[in-house]
Structures are given as C-alpha cells and as structure tokens.
Image (cartoon, rainbow, N blue to C red):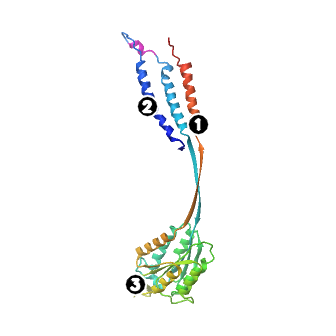
Amino acid sequence: MTFHSPQYLFLLLLLIPVIAWYIVEMRKSDASLQMSDTQPMKLTPRTWRLYLLHLPFVLRVAAIILISIALARPQLSNRWHKEQTEGIDIMMALDISGTMNAEDLRPNRLEAAKEKATEFINSRPNDNIGLVVFAGESFCQCPLTTDHAVLINLFRSVKFGMIDDGTAIGLGLANAVNRMKDSPTKSKVIILLTDGSNNRGDIDPLTAAQIAKTYGIRVYAIGVGSKKPARIPYQTPMGIQYTTIENEFDEGTLKQIAQTTGGEYFRATDNNSLTSIYQQIDQMEKTKIRVREYSKRSEAFFPFLLSAFLCLLLDIILRYFVLRTITN
C-alpha cells in the first residue's frame, strides 16, 4: 500500500495534545466524598456503564486516525512484469581422443572437462546447448536443446573408445557448425575443447573456422594440458601401466580459429584454470532478458472513511443515549 498525499498523516500528531487534554480533564472531574468506612462501597457491584466510560473518547481518537489515513489517499498497487528471454545457442565440441586420458588434470582431462562443462550448463538455464564429440571421427552426441537434464546425462555417458582414435579438430568444428547454422537465434557460440593437433579428417580446422565465421558463429577454443610431461594410463596383460607424453599441441591453429570467428583462445593447465575459463565465457556470453513492467493503482480510502463514520456514529449513540450526563 502507498499513499498519494502522505503529508496528511502529520494530522496524527494532533492526537498528542488531545490525549493529554483528556487525561487532565478526567483528573479534574474526579469527585470526592468523605466516608467513615469504605467497606460497604467495596461490596457495591460495578455497572456495565462504568466499563464504557472511556469508550467514546477512544472512538473519537480512532475516527481522527482513520480520517487522517483517508485524507492521505491510500492506494493499492498491483505490479506485474512481462519477461522476454533471448537465449544463446551454444554447441560444445569435445575432444575424446586417447590423450584426453592424461592425468595432469584430475582425475583426467576428459573427466575434468565433463565436470566443468556440466557446471557451465547448469548456469545457463535459458540457452540452447548441444554436444559434439570428436576423435578420429565426429558425431553429434546431443543436438541443441533446453532440456539440460538430458544433455547432462548424455555428457556423462561420453567415454574413451566411442569412436576411432585420432584428433580431427576440423571435422569436429565443422560438425558443430552444421548443427547450429540454420538456427534463427542471433547469438551462436561453439566451445571447442581439445588437447592435440589436427591429424585426422578431411576438413582443415581453419577452413572450418571460415565456415563458422560465414554463419556468424564465434568459437571459444580451449587448449587442455599442463606445460609439464603428463602420464597416460594404458591397459596391459599385467594390469594398468603408465606412459609419459609431452604436452605439445598446435596452439597457433586454435588461436587462429578463435581470432577468425571473433572468439578467444584459452589454455587450461589444471582444474582451477578450466573452471576460470568457463566462468569467463559465461560472463562474456550473457543471455539477453527484456523486461516490461506494468503497474495498476486503485484507491483504498473508502474503507477508512466508512470506519471513521461508524466510530463517530457509535460515539454519538453512547454519549447521548447510553452514557448521558445530567447538567444543571
């Protein structure tokens, strides 16, 4: 509730001298009578009129309060808003080649990438997000969708060996572009995550980047891997064995892909830096929300005015018909 003319509420300050005057007058009007014994008076029952003695004054005070509120014109406000959300199309192109099994990120590169991508997806409830995986080949694990629960389940089911080994970056990027090129959404983004150099596929990564640029798609390229040698486990008849690899991949190509499409290149050397990268992308690619607010006000003074009238009417009835005083 709001007031159109709140200055009238200052009339309530008049109650201070009115109440003070009433208390003084009541003390002046106290009658006294000398008696030898007050015991008989204690046995005299009190009438109901005695309990109503101060009610007329209370009613007048209440009337002043209610009239002041009515003059201030209380108003009820009904607010609502209309929200229009313009989401972003985000296709995630994830490298699942054998080197993504390296343990320089915990528990390994692929699992770390899946975990951080899941956190990113949960932070983007209004966006269409899909998943393309690639190694020696590429396929769409999940098309663009707002059903993120399904997307996350498909993300978690990604594992090594789903497709032939290798690193077909150009093919994975082109597949992601193909999945979102016909979308009517104005803002389109691909998050390309890999730890290798292109060594498979018929499409050159820079050619795929040019195709993405043609369709207005930005590519954020993430190179995964520490700057130190990393261990990769592999299965043998004797159990799990480890081999060490050097973390050398084609950063130059990833930077060119990002530059060509208007995106950015990032290097993730551990889990914390990968988290930070997704947070940066989240800040750069904000979903647009348009909000139109409406407000409807209605006058609410009448109930206060009616209540004040009833208080005054009851005051008159009590003073002139119930608690009448006889004066000479």
Give whichever of discs 2 and 1 has the lower sequence position. Answer: 2
Residue placed most toward the observer, 235 or 233? 233
Three-letter code, disc 3: Arg
Three-letter code, disc 2: Ile
Cα gap from disc 3 to disc 2, whole angstroms:
84 Å
Q: Is residue 136 visible?
A: no
Confirm or deny contact between disc 3 and disc 2 (CB under 8 A): no
Give the residue displayed 54% in from the left and 25% down from the top: 315
Cα gap from disc 3 to disc 1, whole angstroms:
79 Å
Name the residue tied to disc 1.
303
Res 42 → quadrant: top left
Give whichever of discs 3 and 2 has the lower sequence position. Answer: 2
Spot occupied by residue 91 in the image (x, y as percentages of width and height)? 55, 76
Residue placed most toward the observer, 5 or 93? 5
Give whichever of discs 3 and 1 has the lower sequence position. Answer: 3
Spot occupied by residue 147 in the image (x, y as percentages of width and height)? 58, 68
- Left of 71 or right of it: where is 32? left
Give the residue displayed 56% in from the left and 64% down from the top: 289
Three-letter code, disc 1: Pro
Q: Which mark is residue 231?
A: 3
Above or below — where is 37 with respect to 306?
above
Foreground tag (2 vs 1) = 2
Of the 4 image quadrants, the one containing the N terminus is top right
Q: Magenta stretch?
A: 38-44
Spot occupied by residue 100 in the image (x, y as percentages of width and height)? 46, 82
Q: Secondary structure at mark 1?
A: helix
Above or below — where is 296 with respect to 162?
above
Confirm or deny contact between disc 3 and disc 1 (CB under 8 A): no
Q: Which mark is residue 16?
A: 2
Cα gap from disc 2 to disc 1, whole angstroms:
25 Å
Above or below — where is 302 with respect to 314?
below
Q: Is residue 260 visible?
A: yes
